[in-house]
Amino acid sequence: MKDPLTGCTYDIVFQNLKLYSKNGENFCKELMAVLQQRADLESSYAKGLQKLASKLTKASGNVKQNSIYNSWTCVSQEMNAIADLHRKLGAAVQLEAIQPLCQVVEDHAKKKKPLDSAVAKMAKLVNNNWNQQIKVKKKLMNCTKEHEAIFHLVEDNKHLLLEKDRQKLLTKLKKSSETLTKTDDEYYQLNMAGLDTRLKWESTLEHCYKSIQDLEKERIQLLCNILNKYSQHVSSFGETLISCQKQIHEAINNVDAEKDIHSLIHETSLLTEENKSDFLLADYYEEDIKTVMELGRRKSSIGMKVQRLQNAILKGTRDKDGLEKMIKMYRDNPAFSDRKTLEDTAAILDETNLRLNLLEASLFKLTCTLADLEKKAKPDHPVKNCISKWKEKDCEHSTVQISRPVKMKRLPQNMNLMTSTTSLSQADYPRGSQQHLHGSVSNSMKQLSLNLRNSTEGDNGEEELEFSATSDEEDYDQRDHSAQSTGTSESNIGTCKALYDYTAVRDDELNLKAGDFLIIHQKDDDGWWYGTLKEQKGHFPATYVEELPHFQVLKSSEA
């Protein structure tokens, strides 16, 4: 059976961080053994110290090289040179190095154990829900098949049976219908619960990822502190140790704990914004044209499911609009909220968008089935390339792959930069050296929203469904802008929609109003784009607009 978590981006990043943490833990254990043995050396210290230096060198070679581990390699070289002078270090090593390391290793092991258990527990829930959906789906298929058999039996023999026998069959048909309705609702609830379980699993991974990352920062900082204390003891040995002390001191000067922490984040963080997740779509008996069922009843049954999805989409769209207005209010009025509130609201919006995507993918699949039954052209929608089907024995399953924003990303280069209220006027700098500070923390989030439009056609009451898609992208960062001249003929590389009003401060910039549609001719890496608005060309800030995907069907008459 297909594993829903295989190849998941979140899981790959989390496992890479665990491997990094395991190597660091092994290094600390090996270091503790080395220092403990060194503390026990007395008369035969010189010979033992030379052996331990080799072990320390080997231990350092098993981890990713950085300034911390390179410094410990230098320590092993120093141990070879001054083996007969380090007898006094025994007590200091025991007190200031071994005990803190032992404490950190034990604390980290206790903290990581419940984290691993939580991840495994949530992964099990995701797999169980996946299997339950498939099991209930098979049950629903059988119930539908039995119900259809009873229905045809009643229809074919209603004029031949006695009234008593006919009433028995009708009672049996009613019970079958009730069982079918109950099973169908159970299947739908399981399908929706699968979404919540998947989100909880991703949230657990994110929490554990951050916790383990913090533990690794603590470990690196401890190793740095031990090196500094070690350097102080070596410096006290006097003139005979000056040459060795210089070597150690040079290595210590090259230690940059903050740089190593950034290296940790760089090695274990996700390099791409793309994250695609597979979700199991609801498949129904009525969708299989090979099954026995009247065309009218098949269409009617699918229509009921379509109506249910439409109602859920309508509710989700209202929730989405409310959340977007709330986020806009928070950004326009920072005093009304803090950073955590804004992040929590954005996370709820992301979950709402994901729920809408899943519902609309299911709706698109059902409308395609209706189009086949009515012998009409299938609706065109970008989600069709994201839906895949696979068979397990005699049962076919459908999954949809949805792009998600990635939260496990690299931190800003300056870890000491917490918040800033500084803003730079655009008019104070010429283009090419201009900087724009749009917030305290660089944040990028891509969201996919599929909008449903219903249009009624003809007198028969049938509805044709059209889809359009929009993409919300906000990217706040400090950049340098370099203007590039464009030729007499520009190519159209896309379109975008203005999210906020913007007043031009230079002659070559465009005035924007929320809701304006623009044609994009050029994208610069500094956050400024070049395009056309109402037959006027100029530059505009990319953070004030949202780019529309290439499959967008809604076009502006003003662009």
Image (tube, grey):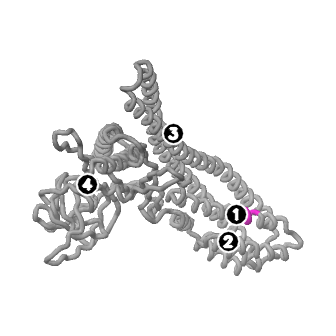
Q: Could you give the CA–CA distance between mark 2 and mark 3, rounded to whole angstroms?
A: 53 Å
Residue type for callout 4: Ala
**Which residue in the protein does label 4 denote?**
377
Disc 3 target residue:
139
Q: How many marks?
A: 4
Q: Nearer the viewer, mark 2 or mark 3?
A: 3
Tell me the kind of residue under disc 1. Answer: Asn
Residue ID for mark 2 = 62
Q: Going from the N terminus, do you reach mark 4 or mark 1 first?
A: 1
The residue furthest top is 164
Tell me the residue at 14%/60% (across/down).
559
For numbered disc 1, what is the local secondary structure? helix
Q: Earlier in the sequence, mark 4 or mark 2?
A: 2
Q: Is residue 335 magenta?
A: no
Mark 2 element type: loop
Q: Which of pointers 4 and 3 lies earlier in the amino acid sequence?
A: 3
Q: Position of residue 512 (x, y in %)?
A: 17, 57
Part of the protein shown in magenta: 27-32
SS category of the residue bearing label 4: loop
In this rendering, would 9 be left or right of 321? Answer: right
> Residue 26: which numbered mark, if any?
1
Task: Using the image, determine if residue 412 lies above or below residue 142.
Answer: below
Disc 1, disc 2: CB below 8 Å? yes
Q: In whole angstroms, how far apart are the C-alphas of marks 4 and 1?
A: 62 Å
